[in-house]
Image (cartoon, rainbow, N blue to C red):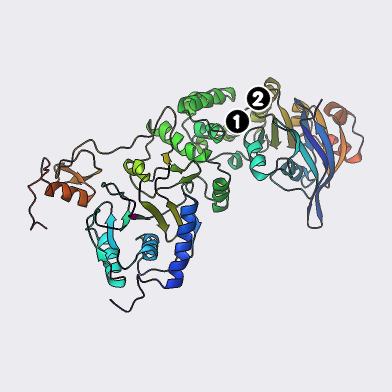
């Protein structure tokens, strides 16, 4: 089976400091991988390198493109990479404001990716937007409101709808539940889990919240100081951590 | 003739501007950066158009300036006088007779010929400006032909107003490649952008020149189910009776009395000379102001 994403010896340095280094893994279709670690451990750097927002200093990121099979996204041309960015890839930012156009209505936000891939029929675009707003539990009558009129949780759901509307195969998520209160988090996780299963999405989720990966991720990668220190199935890593740092991480979770 | 160099600008500057114009003509719709000069008028009064006009004017040219279609407004009169003084060229109000026409916000009603040049004054050359504030990003979008965002603006129009409410500066795609802001002309004029004459666009403050060569394909952006429609006031000109020209609306008194008249003053006057009379028009007299 061809992996959807193949990462080999990826490294990114900020001058002398290590962003992340020696990262290798394969991600298969339909698989959800979590990346956990403390602040500054290099998880966001890694995610940005994978999604093409940062150029890594070493290594290869090969994506299984529809036309040409496995292809290195770092050496491919910029138009090609940006095309992937708005078709087969999706990126969910921690802060919805970074991923949304705040001065464009909810419908326009969802429709933008469709129009970017040459949808030119207003009625169809609007129908699709209404469908997707429904899927993320935003009622139809809010379609012409701007995201500024939405609550934090709604903004995050709108961002997810905007990203998934073109039917991507790989979703990058950077702390998708950060900054939301727990009940909203729970509903968002529920929604994400059903969307991921329903659309058979592959996803890479960066988070420092172990509950998020426990719910969503099949596999887990633990990072510290730019290195991957432990990998494995999520339950295995969380229930039987081998590394001292992972043990600390797991035992630091507050029990209610 | 005065002590100015011909057409005010020095020869090196004109050469630089002509190079930008040639590049613009070679890549229709592409915004060519140029080193815009200080002109003896404030930004927003047509400094870009004036520099382009200065670069293309020849001593034997006949020059015409219109502002919102009119030859007799402050902006038009002062720019016309400027070139009368600094270039000593002949000037005219008749579209027919002019070889170079500088315009603000209109395309003349009369069809332009292959030996005529139309120079536009452009306030903001970047059609994506109010959607994407970063110039670095908009340039990249032009380079990679990522124009989905332009349709987001039209989508917003329809969702808020029920129709594409953009009435001027309506975005166009030039020769199937670059999306271009045709300057704030009414969308009524958009179909005329495909013409026999050369069209040059100058933005002084933003330091950009772009161009449409003769007979270039210019398509107004739209949706399949909301096609582009040029619009004008649903009325005939009250002075000359024309039903096919773009109209200005004039408020006549405090009681709401209104009058519609051609925005193209030369077109209106020519028609009245030819004996056409509108609902409120008087027959043409030679001595009338």
Question: Is residue B186 in sight in this rendering?
Answer: yes
* Residue indicated by mark 1: A157
Give the residue drawn at x 58%, y 44%: B144
Question: Is residue B206 in sight in this rendering?
Answer: no
Marks 1 & 2, CB-CB < 8 Å contact: yes
Of residues A183 and B253, the one drawn nearer to the viewer in this rendering: B253
Q: Which mark is first along the chain, 2 or 1?
A: 1
Magenta stretch in the rendered image: B113-117
Of residues A230 and B11, the one drawn nearer to the viewer in this rendering: B11
Q: Is residue B105 above or below residue B255?
A: below
> Toward which corner of the image does residue A252 lie, by quadrant?
top right
Q: Is residue A213 left or right of residue B17?
A: right
* Residue indicated by mark 2: A191
Q: Is residue B182 above or below residue B56?
A: above
- Image coordinates for residue B60, horizontal then vertical, percent: 30, 66
Residue B114 on the magenta span = yes
Q: Secondary structure at mark 1?
A: helix
Q: Secondary structure at mark 2?
A: helix
Mark 2 neighbour density, 10 Å: few (under 14) some (14–19) many (20 or more)? some
- Image coordinates for residue B78, horizontal then vertical, percent: 27, 65
Give the total number of marks visible in the rendering: 2
- Image coordinates for residue B145, horizontal then vertical, percent: 55, 43
Q: Main secondary structure of the magenta part?
A: loop
Q: Quadrant of the C terminus of chain A?
A: top right
């Amino acid at each position: 089976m061809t992996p959807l994403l193949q990462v080999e010896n990826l490294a990114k340095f900020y001058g002398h400091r290590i962003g992340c280094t020696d990262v290798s893994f394969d991600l298969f279709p339909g698989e959800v991988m979590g990346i956990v670690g403390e602040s500054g451990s290099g998880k966001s750097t890694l995610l940005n390198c994978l999604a093409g927002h940062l150029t890594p200093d070493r290594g290869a990121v090969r994506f299984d493109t529809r036309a040409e099979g496995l292809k290195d996204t770092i050496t491919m041309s910029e138009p090609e990479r940006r095309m992937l960015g708005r078709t087969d890839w999706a990126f969910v930012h921690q802060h919805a404001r970074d991923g949304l156009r705040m001065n464009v209505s909810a419908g326009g936000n969802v429709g933008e990716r469709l129009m970017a891939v040459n949808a030119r029929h207003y009625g169809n675009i609007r129908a699709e937007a209404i469908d997707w707003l429904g899927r993320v539990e935003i009622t139809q009558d809010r379609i012409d409101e701007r995201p500024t009129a939405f609550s934090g949780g709604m903004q995050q759901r709108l961002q997810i709808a905007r990203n998934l509307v073109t039917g991507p195969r790989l979703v990058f998520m950077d702390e998708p539940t950060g900054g939301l209160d727990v009940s909203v988090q729970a509903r968002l996780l529920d929604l994400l889990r059903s969307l991921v299963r329903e659309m058979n999405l592959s996803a890479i989720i960066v988070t420092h919240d172990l509950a998020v990966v426990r719910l969503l991720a099949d596999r887990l990668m633990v990072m510290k100081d730019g290195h991957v220190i432990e990998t494995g199935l999520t339950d295995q890593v969380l229930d039987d951590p081998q590394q001292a740092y992972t043990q600390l991480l797991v035992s630091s979770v507050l029990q209610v | 003739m005065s002590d100015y160099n011909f057409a005010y600008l020095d020869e090196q500057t004109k050469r630089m501007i002509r190079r930008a114009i040639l590049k613009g003509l070679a890549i229709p719709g592409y915004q060519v950066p140029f080193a815009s000069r200080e002109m003896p008028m404030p930004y927003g009064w047509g400094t870009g158009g004036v520099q382009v006009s200065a670069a293309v004017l020849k001593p034997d040219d006949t020059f015409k300036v219109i502002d919102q279609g009119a030859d007799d407004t402050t902006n038009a009169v002062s720019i016309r006088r400027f070139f009368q003084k600094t270039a000593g060229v002949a000037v005219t109000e008749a579209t027919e007779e002019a070889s170079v026409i500088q315009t603000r916000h209109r395309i003349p009603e009369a069809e332009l010929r292959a030996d005529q040049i139309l120079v536009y004054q452009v306030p903001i050359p970047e059609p994506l400006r109010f959607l994407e504030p970063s110039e670095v990003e908009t340039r990249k979008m032009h380079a990679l032909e990522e124009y989905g965002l332009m349709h987001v603006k039209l989508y917003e129009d329809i969702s808020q107003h029920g129709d594409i409410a953009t009435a001027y500066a309506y975005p166009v795609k030039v020769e199937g490649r670059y999306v271009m802001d045709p300057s704030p002309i009414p969308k009524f004029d958009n179909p005329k952008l495909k013409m026999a004459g050369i069209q040059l666009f100058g933005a002084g403050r933003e330091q950009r020149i772009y161009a449409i060569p003769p007979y270039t394909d210019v398509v107004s952006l739209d949706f399949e189910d909301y096609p582009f429609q040029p619009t004008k006031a649903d009325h005939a000109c009250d002075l000359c009776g024309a039903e096919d020209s773009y109209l200005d609306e004039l408020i006549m008194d405090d009681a709401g009395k209104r009058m519609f008249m051609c925005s193209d003053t030369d077109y209106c006057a020519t028609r009245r000379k030819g004996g056409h009379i509108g609902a409120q028009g008087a027959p043409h007299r030679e001595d009338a102001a």
